[in-house]
Amino acid sequence: MQTLLSDSDSEGLEDSQYSLRPQTLDEFIGQGRVKKQLRIHIEAAKSRGQALAHILFVSPPGLGKTTLARIVANEMGSSFKSAVGPAMERLDIATLLTNLEERAIFFIDEIHRMKGYVQESMYPAMEDYKIDLPIGQGPAADIITVPLAHFTLVGATTREGLLGGPFRDRFGNRIHLDYYSPEEIQIAINRLSERLQPSVKIEEDAEYELARRSRGTMRIAENMLRKVRDYATVESDGIITYEIAQEALDFFEIDELGLDDNDRTYLRTMIEKFRGRAGLKAMAVAVSEDERTIEEVYEPYLIKLGFLTLTPMGRVATDAAYQHLGYPTPEYQSTLF
Ligand SMILES: Nc1ncnc2c1ncn2[C@@H]1O[C@H](COP(=O)(O)OP(=O)(O)OP(=O)(O)O)[C@@H](O)[C@H]1O
Ligand SMILES: [Mg+2]
């Protein structure tokens, strides 16, 4: 199994594709409740001429956290600065914070991986827009308090539970994004097919077929469209018909529910090696994948599908998982936990 934790910022895509991201709340598909909430906060902050309250975006990978952070900056007419959680030290944060403009959006990705003491150093910045800086060293060291611009911290995390409680509580708005419906994803596929250069010809039922198998995730849909486009170009006349879409998805081993080879290997390993129940560490070793990727990339959708449950005694493959993979359902499975 070889999967990289998805990179947050469309890394690896050509420059021109950055502009394919939705730029405004209107262009951002779905998540109606979230958009409504953001519109209210943005309008209110703008009418008062104030900075937005700090926002924490929470979701599995690829649902639009980074995109929304940029949109919030656009809609506020604010500058946008970003950093990645694990790399940040206190001094880096201080340098970034002291250089922010009034009402800037300061985006920290993977904020749950920020070190504890670095999180703590953010408290006065978040609450009172000031930061304590040490001056000098040793016994003569002194602390000076530096005032900061009124900024908005926007954090993104796939694992809200790993944030320190007091840190999490300092975000005025904690916003959870949900998986998308096939209909919402179809709209995104349709738009992307028109915006890609050259544009992609794809029939409506083919759009839906890709959407249906995208695991409710925009990033997966976008990648799938690009892969299927390649298939259609080489194996056919470039037009993605329903038949070509199906052929391509079979070829790339994406099944009816959108599970790929990695997902199936994960479930098969759990069933065949561990009789349907295993701890995270054991699974990570067995499928040669790091624990974080398993927890953040594989498991959330398997849980949503009802193929996996997390119990205090380990992860458990459900009857539905056995059936989907064509195994006989174990007789006493459901009484095990
Ligand atoms: N609601 C949406 N409408 C249209 N496109 C979207 C939407 N949400 C996400 N996308 C697209 O999906 C891709 C992934 O989005 P994004 O990078 O914002 O996800 P993320 O939640 O930050 O993921 P990660 O946790 O991996 O950092 C982007 O190319 C983005 O343009
Ligand atoms: Mg991101």
Image (cartoon, rainbow, N blue to C red):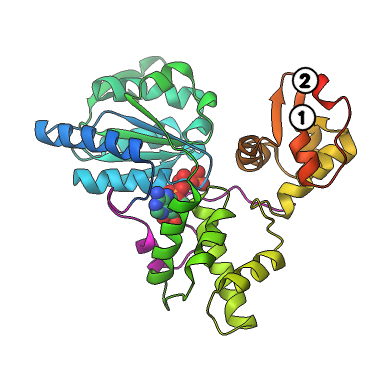
Name the dominant secondary structure of the magenta segment: loop
Task: Give residue 84's position: percent from left, percent from top.
Answer: 46, 42
What amino acid type should be assigned to the residue bearing mark 1? Val
Depth check, front residue: 244 or 131 = 244
The residue that mark 2 highlights is 313
Q: What range is drawn magenta here? A: 1-27
What amino acid type should be assigned to the residue bearing mark 2? Met
Task: Give residue 129's position: percent from left, percent from top.
Answer: 24, 25
Task: Give residue 43's position: percent from left, percent from top.
Answer: 17, 36
Q: Secondary structure at mark 1?
A: strand
* Magenta residue check for 296: no
Name the residue located 53 percent from the left edge and 51 percent from the top edge. 7
Examine the rendering and report whether any part of residue 318 can be seen: yes
Q: CA distance from mark 1 to mark 2?
A: 9 Å
Q: Is residue 48 above or below residue 192?
A: above
Query: Looking at the rendered structure, which numbered label has been put on residue 316?
Result: 1
User: Circles 1 and 2: CB distance less than 8 Å?
Assistant: yes
Side (left or right) of 128 relative to 20: left
